[in-house]
Image: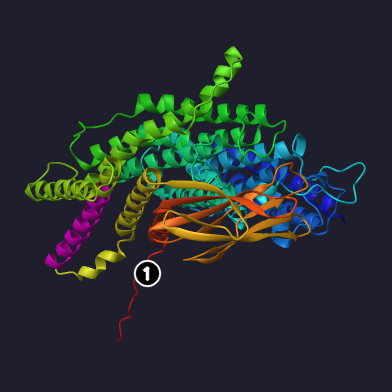
């Protein structure tokens, strides 16, 4: 048994089991036959088993340097270190789709264990199995990761150098796919709810799934920003690259859904909006994959071009047709009872959701506009970071304002205590802006200080009121922290506010300087003194590295690098980043004397508060985990006779 044969057979069996599961689940719904549903439930773990076998077969082929498999020959070499070989399955198109298929079978298996009424359970499984059929069908036809190589080479090409230049690529894509695929479960529940006309309870049943997917997407976006910051050598973490936008869009739509779903759980409102948001969120993951893997866009992230573009576009349209086809009937059948009070918690939550969806619309239009112009006129245009930054600024400010005021507002009329809290929030906002201006900050940075203090005050007020209310009710005040959803959400909000503060300062106060230094020459920039000691060349097998030796007065010896890969004509920068709570010091080797190593061109970028952006990502992750962490079950004491 060879890796290629094992992988090919496993893929085929996973496809057949997905087809069988889809048919059994669909007919179980149509005929109301519980036996067919049991058959579909049995197919879920078996499909996951064979998908896992296929993935392990690809890992086996990579570790065994089996160049008879085309994917291995084109994306692996014997010089690759172990960790690079292990992450190579998602280095290109076919392996990425295999990873998606594996995770899809995992989510389907986990979702199949959730107890629902047989009608909705059948449709949830049918939808998830249908998604599996698509991905395994793509692998069985036009993107087979186990396609044989007719004349196997003795050495492979190796993966894209950008994927092997930093360990974060072992983490970021997996987190992203866990988030993308995770949104298929809420979508499947929404389809089942619309088909069976049970529009209310599904949001509570899928809240956990949505939050899991949202948490993975949040972690993936932060990890991707960190990778961009550490690898690409430009000193930034977000460039509004089309593929960055494609990952941001599902996060925005999932965030909108999480907020309006809360209203539906508590008040029974926004049922049509929630179904629309979930459909758009999952459809946007397919759109993101289409943009990433079809080759229609130019991006440092879009590593693979292949024949899958039209197929993914068709699947994207199919998802929209299914979701909005059912939604058209739902919209006629569901009506909202009572008027909406804008100055209330539900009004703030809906307005916040519209902010997120509107932001998503801006991202879509800005990303696709160059493609549409080229398709219809042949002209090449670009929509860059200045456009996205200019439009995103007021949206971000609006979201941060609603994030503080929304939880403070009541569901109905505002009482005297609410008015007092709103005055506290206004005072915190004005005080923060005033302090920022006094310190000489720009108006934008001062506003960021005010918004952070405003949200910090909101978290403090809500925590204090919760403690006081429990004490007045005769309960243990500290039991408030066992209310995981409430307190975890406040932690997430605090993390988002901290991220906003970090982004504002890092954009406003970035300093950049570049100088060509000769051996022994000293240079002082941004309050840092450094001396160039020379360059050193290193042969690391899979690549050739050159590093500049810089002795600094604050951080000791710093060694920014250039990496030379056989697959690339130009070297790849590997910056050296010194993180501090106040400023990051970012050293980039731009060029060097290739004859004698007598000089080197060095760029220094000093950016404030980037360190706190990664801290904010950690705070958001901790808040999400706190919400998801299962609550301890109360102990039942047996009566003693």
Q: From this viewpoint, which residue is outermost toward the right?
A: 151
Residue 107 in sight in this render? no
In the figure, is residue 437 to the left or right of 325?
Answer: left
The residue wearing badge 1 is 633
Q: From this viewpoint, which residue is outermost toward the left?
A: 416
Residue 481 in sight in this render? yes
Magenta: main secondary structure: helix
Please provide the residue range marked out in magenta.
451-473
Q: Is residue 180 positioned above or below 30 on the image?
A: below
The picture places residue 558, in percent across and down from the top left corner, at 56, 62
Q: From this viewpoint, which residue is outermost toward the top?
A: 377
Image quarter where the C terminus lies is: bottom left
The verdict on residue 267 being magenta is no
The residue depicted at 19 percent of the width and 47 percent of the height is: 429
Q: Name the residue nearer the viewer: 535 or 199.
A: 535
Q: From this viewpoint, which residue is outermost toward the bottom?
A: 641
The verdict on residue 457 being magenta is yes
Q: Is residue 376 positioned above or below 158 on the image?
A: above
The residue depicted at 37 percent of the width and 44 percent of the height is: 258
Colour mapping used in the image: rainbow
The picture places residue 224, in percent across and down from the top left corner, at 53, 48
In the figure, is residue 567 to the left or right of 190?
Answer: right
Q: Name the residue nearer the viewer: 147 or 192.
A: 147
The residue depicted at 76 percent of the width and 47 percent of the height is: 75
The residue depicted at 59 percent of the width and 18 percent of the height is: 374
Image quarter where the N terminus lies is: bottom right
Question: Considering the numbered disc 1 on the image, is that residue within a helix, a strand or a loop?
Answer: loop
In the figure, is residue 481 to the left or right of 306?
Answer: left
């Amino acid at each position: 048994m060879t890796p290629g044969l094992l992988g090919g057979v496993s893929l085929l069996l996973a496809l057949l089991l997905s087809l069988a599961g889809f048919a059994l689940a669909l007919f179980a719904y149509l005929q109301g036959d519980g036996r067919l549903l049991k058959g579909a439930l049995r197919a879920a773990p078996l499909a996951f088993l064979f998908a896992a076998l296929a993935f392990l077969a690809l890992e086996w082929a990579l570790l065994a340097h089996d160049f008879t498999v085309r994917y291995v020959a084109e994306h692996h070499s014997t010089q690759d270190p172990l960790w690079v070989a292990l992450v190579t399955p998602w280095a290109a198109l076919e392996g990425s789709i295999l990873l998606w298929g594996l995770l899809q079978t995992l989510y389907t298996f986990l979702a199949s264990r959730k107890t629902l009424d047989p009608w909705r359970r059948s449709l949830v499984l049918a939808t998830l199995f249908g998604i599996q059929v698509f991905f395994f069908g793509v692998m069985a036809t036009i993107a087979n990761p186990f396609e044989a190589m007719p004349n196997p080479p003795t050495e492979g090409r190796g993966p894209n150098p950008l994927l092997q230049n930093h360990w974060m690529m072992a983490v970021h894509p997996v987190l992203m796919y866990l988030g993308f695929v995770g949104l298929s479960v809420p979508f499947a529940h929404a389809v089942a709810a619309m088909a069976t006309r049970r529009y209310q309870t599904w949001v509570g049943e899928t809240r956990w799934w949505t939050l899991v997917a949202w948490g993975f997407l949040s972690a993936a976006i932060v990890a991707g920003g960190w990778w961009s910051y550490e690898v690409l050598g430009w000193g930034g973490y977000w460039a509004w690259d089309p593929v960055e936008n494609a990952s941001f869009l599902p996060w925005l739509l999932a965030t909108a859904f999480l907020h309006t779903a809360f209203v539906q759980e508590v008040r029974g409102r926004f049922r049509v909006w929630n179904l629309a948001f979930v459909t758009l969120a999952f459809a946007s993951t397919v759109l993101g994959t289409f943009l990433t893997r079809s080759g229609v866009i130019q991006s440092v992230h879009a590593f693979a071009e292949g024949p899958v573009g039209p197929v993914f576009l068709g699947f994207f349209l199919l998802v929209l047709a299914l979701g909005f086809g059912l939604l058209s009937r739902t919209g006629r059948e569901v009506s909202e009872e009572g008027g909406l009070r804008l100055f209330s918690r539900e009004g703030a939550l809906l307005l916040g959701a519209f902010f997120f969806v509107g932001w998503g619309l801006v991202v879509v239009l800005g990303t696709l506009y160059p493609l549409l112009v080229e398709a219809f006129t042949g002209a090449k245009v670009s929509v860059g970071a200045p456009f996205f930054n200019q439009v995103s600024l007021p949206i971000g400010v609006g979201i941060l304002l609603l994030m503080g005021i929304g939880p403070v507002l009541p569901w109905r009329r505002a009482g005297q205590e609410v008015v007092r809290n709103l005055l506290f929030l206004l005072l915190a906002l004005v005080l923060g802006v005033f302090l920022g201006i006094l310190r000489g900050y720009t108006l934008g940075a001062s506003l960021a200080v005010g918004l952070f203090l405003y949200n910090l005050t909101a978290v403090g007020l809500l925590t204090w009121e919760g403690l006081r209310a429990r004490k007045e009710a005769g309960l243990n005040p500290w039991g408030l922290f066992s209310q995981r959803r409430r307190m975890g959400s406040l932690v997430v909000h605090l993390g988002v506010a901290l991220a906003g503060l970090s982004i504002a300062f890092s954009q406003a106060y970035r300093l950049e300087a570049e100088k060509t230094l000769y051996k022994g020459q000293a240079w002082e920039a941004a309050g840092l003194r450094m001396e160039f000691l020379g360059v050193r060349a290193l042969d690391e097998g899979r690549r050739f590295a050159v590093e500049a030796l810089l002795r600094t007065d604050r951080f000791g010896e710093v060694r920014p690098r250039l990496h030379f890969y056989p697959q690339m004509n130009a070297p790849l920068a590997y910056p050296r980043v010194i993180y501090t709570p106040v400023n990051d010091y970012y050293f980039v080797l731009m060029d060097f004397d290739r004859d004698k190593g007598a000089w080197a061109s060095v760029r220094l970028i000093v950016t404030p508060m980037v360190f706190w952006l990664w801290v904010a990502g950690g705070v958001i992750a901790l808040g999400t985990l706190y919400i998801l962490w299962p609550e301890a079950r109360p102990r039942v004491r047996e009566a003693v006779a």
